[in-house]
Each structure stands twice: as structure tokens, then as C-alpha cells.
Amino acid sequence: MKRLSLVTMILITLMSLSSCVNEAKEKESRKARSVGGTSEILMITQNDAQWEGAMGQAVRDFFEQEQYGLPQPEKNFKVAHLNIDALSDMFKKHRNLIIGKIDKDIKKPLVETQKNWVSEPQYVIRITAPSEESWVRTFDSQKDGLKLMFDENERARFQEFFRPTTDTKIVNQLKKQFGVKMNIPEGYFIGIDKDNFMWIRKETDVMSMAFMIYELPYKDTADFNPDNIIRVRDSIVKKYIPGPIDGSYMTTDKEFIKPISKVLHRFPAGYAVETRGLWNVVGDFMAGPFVSYSIVNPEHTKIITAEGWIYYPNKDKRDLLRQQESILYSLRFVE
């Protein structure tokens, strides 16, 4: 057997050491998966009095408001509570954490934020203030941005869950038809694909979940007017989404829950207008929530709208709508 040269032995040793170091770094950087129920926030206080008093009330009043666009009342988030002395390693992994503290020795409130503290995806905000009154004022100044981060965390959780089950056939058809990528998970099928319109469906015995994507020429910013978005939506669904009875068709509810729109500057595919509301069926009693995103393509020649909706009568739909929202947030334009 030939002897290994000294240089070869050194190279092998260095490669082995490098591999060990990389494995150690990878193990160190890999964090546990975050825990907690869907749309749940865990608030940590120093004692029960803070939770039952103004601090806890401020958090509950904001995060437990009813989510707009759902036919039955459902809260945006559920806020759970724990005192700091019960914050074990398991609870530290919670996906959405608010840690409140009163420290009379400090002069000004302190706000600290942290992503992926001990798990991922995770978002933590720590608010320390000299009094409960100043704590509440500080929370009120941060709450809108905090909700955006917690919403993002919920989407990240679902995206991570769905990513391994992406239906490549549907993904490839979306690329071909619209020049976009969207991670549709297994269980859906294409119901209609024609005339720059696609209806992607998931049907069970008790519910229906669906996406639709359509493309129209982009003229100017007036295309993003909320009334115009609904007018276009109604014309599209009347043409392509029939109801269960002859002559019935989908439309947008404008009385029980009026649709609302807002501009999103941080939508992954670019500037977008989000629209939320309730759909119903003309000629029948079907109804459910929807959320849509309208975006201009990079060439500024087309406006693409991607929408998700649910039919699940007499059942809670918030978490299912969050699932669809997370899938819609995976939309990207491709070259």
C-alpha cells in the first residue's frame, strides 16, 4: 500500500477539522421550532395584578379585537398570560411574546425587540417602564407595528409548514400563465385555466377553499381604486364562478360587511393593494370571507390580482384565512 504524502495527510486533516467546525456552527445556529397556537400571543408579566390591570387590558383590547371580514365574530389574536417566574424553557419558545416589566429605577421606558430569541419563527418585544401608566402609553405607540410583526410570524409558520408539500404542477402552470411563483400546497387542483384567469380549488365534504388569479392590462393608478377593484372582481366572478343553482353566481357583499382596501408597501411581490371582505352568491345563501392582493408586474403592463376565499358554513374561518393569506404572500414575479 502506498504511503500518503505529508501534504495529502495535512489536507485531509484540515478538511476533517473544517467539517467538524461547520457541523458545530450549523448545530449552534439551528434553533427549535417555535410553539403556540395559531394566532396566539403570550404576555409575560411580573404578577397577576399587571395582567388583570391596565397593562393586560391594553394588550387584550388591541389584539383581541374582532377580525374584519369574517361572517362570525372571531378575534384577531388570542392573548394568553404567564407570570415571569413560570417562564420555563418551553414557554420561551412561544412564537409571539410580549414581556412587560415595571422598574421604578428607570426614568424612561425602554423598548427592545428581538427575532428568533430561542426558537424560529419567533418575535419578542420587551417593554420596561417606570410605571404602569407609562407602560401602557409606550405599548400604544408600538402596537400597530407589533401587530404587523406578529402577522408576519403567523405567515412564516404556515409557509414553513406548506413548503415541503408544494404542488409543482400548479406552480409551473402559474409561472407559464402569469409569470409568477406561488407555493400552492398539495390538495388543490386547477378548476379553470383560460382567458388570463385561473381558479385553483380544494374541496372536501364540509368545506371549500380556493384561489383565483387573473390578469388585466394596467393603465394607471386609478386601477388600484378600491371601487374599481371590486367592480372588476364582480365582473370576473360572475363570469367564472357559478353558484350551485342555475343562474346563480358569486359576487361581493356590500351591505353586511363592506369590503375594505389598504395599500401594502411591504408585500413581497412589490407595491400591492389588499382587499378584504365577504363574498356571497346571487340566487343562493352561500357566503364566506375573502382576501385579495392586486399588484403591477415589473414591466408595468399588467395588473395581477391573486385572491383566496373560503366556504365553511357555521364554522370558524380565521385560521383557514390565515393559511390562504400566507400562501398568497409567497407570490413572486419570475423572470
Image (tube, rainbow, N blue to C red):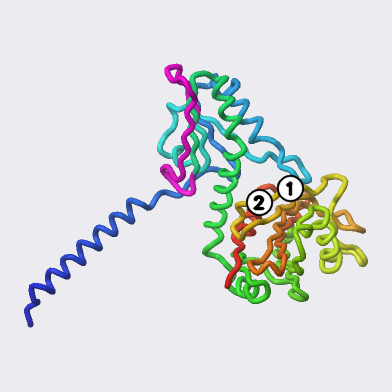
| Residue 92: x %, y % from top left | 44, 38
User: With 15 as the anchor, is 196 left or right in this view?
Assistant: right
Asked if one can make out residue 185 in the rendered structure from this viewpoint, the answer is no
| Residue 124: x %, y % from top left | 49, 39
Mark 1 or mark 2, which is nearer the start of the sequence? 2
Question: Residue 59 occupies which quadrant of the picture?
Answer: top right
Asked if one can make out residue 299 in the rendered structure from this viewpoint, the answer is yes
Q: Which residue is at the far top?
A: 104
Disc ID at residue 264: 2
Looking at the rendering, the stretch of residues picked out in magenta corresponds to 100-122
User: With 44 as the anchor, is 31 left or right in this view?
Assistant: left
Residue for badge 1:
315
Q: Which secondary structure, mark 2?
A: strand
Q: Quadrant of the N terminus?
A: bottom left
User: With 66 as the anchor, is 160 left or right in this view?
Assistant: left
Q: What residue is drawn where x is 46% and y is 41%?
A: 114
Q: What residue is drawn where x is 90% and y is 58%?
A: 282
| Residue 316: x %, y % from top left | 71, 46
> Is 109 one of the magenta-colored residues?
yes
> For the residue carrying disc 2, how many other residues have a C-alpha within 10 Å: few (<14), some (14-19), or many (20+)?
some
Name the foreground residue: 1 vs 118: 118
